[in-house]
Image (cartoon, rainbow, N blue to C red):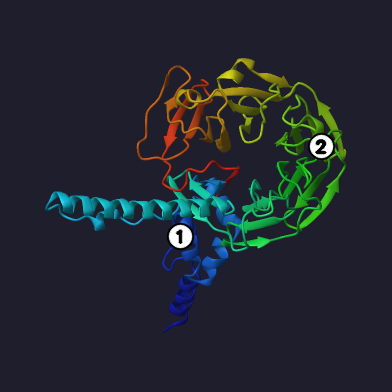
Amino acid sequence: MGKTEKKQQQQEVQNLIPGLPDEIAMECLIRVPYKFHNDLKSVCQRWLNLISSHSFYRERIRSGKAEHLVCQVQPLPLSPPNPKDSSSATTHLVSDSAARITSTKKDQQQDDDDHELHQQRQEVHRTPLQYGLTIFNASNGTWERIRPHVGRIPMFCQCVAVPASRKLLLIGGWDPITLEPVPDVYVLDMVNNSSRWRRVKPMSVARSFFACAVVGASTVCVAGGHDGQKNALKSAEVYDVEADEWRMLPEMDEERDECQGVCLEGDRFFVVSGYGTESQGRFKPDAECYDPKTGSWSKFDHVWPFPSLSPRGSTATITSYRLQQHQWLWFLGKEQQQNGEVVKGKIVSSIVPLPKSVTEGSSSPCVSVTTLHNSQQQQKVFVMTGNGGRGCSSSSALSSFICNECEGEGAFIMERDMSNGNIKWDHVHLPVGFSGFPCSASFLLI
């Protein structure tokens, strides 16, 4: 073999795909669905290095091949086994006396089965509620569940996606057995190890029902919530995801339990509404904002106009490139839709009417909202409701339909055309076992 042929052979071995320029090979690899990426890593070292790099996923985003993942903490279904099939005890009837004997045996068998089912149901109710992480791939309509390897996922923990590092965090919540707030934090790296959770440094304060938001590229701010005695908290802290370090922030002016965290204008952390220890259930109309540039909090009045309604889960923040505004969308029921818009500088809070089939069953339905897509042409938001609604609608006409295959709650994707403001709702099929209402949700583009 000549030197030229040997050099060409070595070059082919070094190529991502032998016989193809790396540019063409990259175009092929970025089109492979995310669920096969772990398989690709096992092909060779170069593929492992490539698909473990964030530049690979940035290229998928740039080329429009990235997939939209909705990450939700959902209760796992708890259902007892089916009772024994009593049909096996059926006997052919040959006479009146035989019929009475057969009936007696069947009644006894049915009583035994009913007693066994009752015991199984009691056992289910005594079992602590367990949660799992559900991934809905909005790009291809598939659902999967990731179970933790680090014990039980805390109840009501915050599910936070960090886009820059493509990591998922589960923060705080309640211990599912003791029902006490916990400071625990778990991380799932969706690029390098998407099947194994890692416990990282905990918060300084155990808390639940707190405000939380990603601020900047790799920091997460938390504030408020309540402690083990159900006292509302004023404390706040910030987590550096890459350094695995927590740092206390100055306290807020007021206690805020069941508050909502929002990051607006790039790096400002808003803690919206909530209530104090002595005013449980009466939600404040104002918000406090932490500015990392000044290291201080400031108050914003008249931000949340619903004293009996929590902002948690039912809102989404979107930047309007066309209007050069930060939009805070509220997905609310019929009673709240009369409030219209609230404008604070470059921040516009506006109410998006839910589908008619959702609001028909409840004036204030429970919803979980996750932003999917935002561009100059279109906005997409994933909405999961908690009253069993089904339907689709547009801004000009509301209509509904029934999906006989789904169970439990309803799921929808809202699409808004930014050129004319028209809204369209599309129903999302919920497979069996994925209908539990999420206590927290976030979004990753990967």
Residue at image point 52% right, 23% down: 419
Q: Nearer the viewer, residue 436 or 123?
A: 123
Q: Residues within 10 Å of mark 2 (few under 14, many from 20)?
A: many
Farthest residue in the bottom direction? 1
**Percent x, y of residue 338:** 61, 15
Q: Which residue is mark 1?
A: 36
Residue 207 appears left or right of 22: right
Residue at image point 72% right, 50% down: 180
When asked about the image quadrant of residue 394, the answer is: top left
Q: Which residue is mark 2?
A: 290
Q: Residues within 10 Å of mark 1 (few under 14, many from 20)?
A: few
Amino acid on which the number 2 mark rests in the picture: Tyr
Q: Secondary structure at mark 2?
A: strand
**Percent x, y of residue 28:** 44, 56
Q: Is residue 51 visible?
A: yes
Residue 426 appears left or right of 102: right
Compared with 298, 153 (above or below) is: below
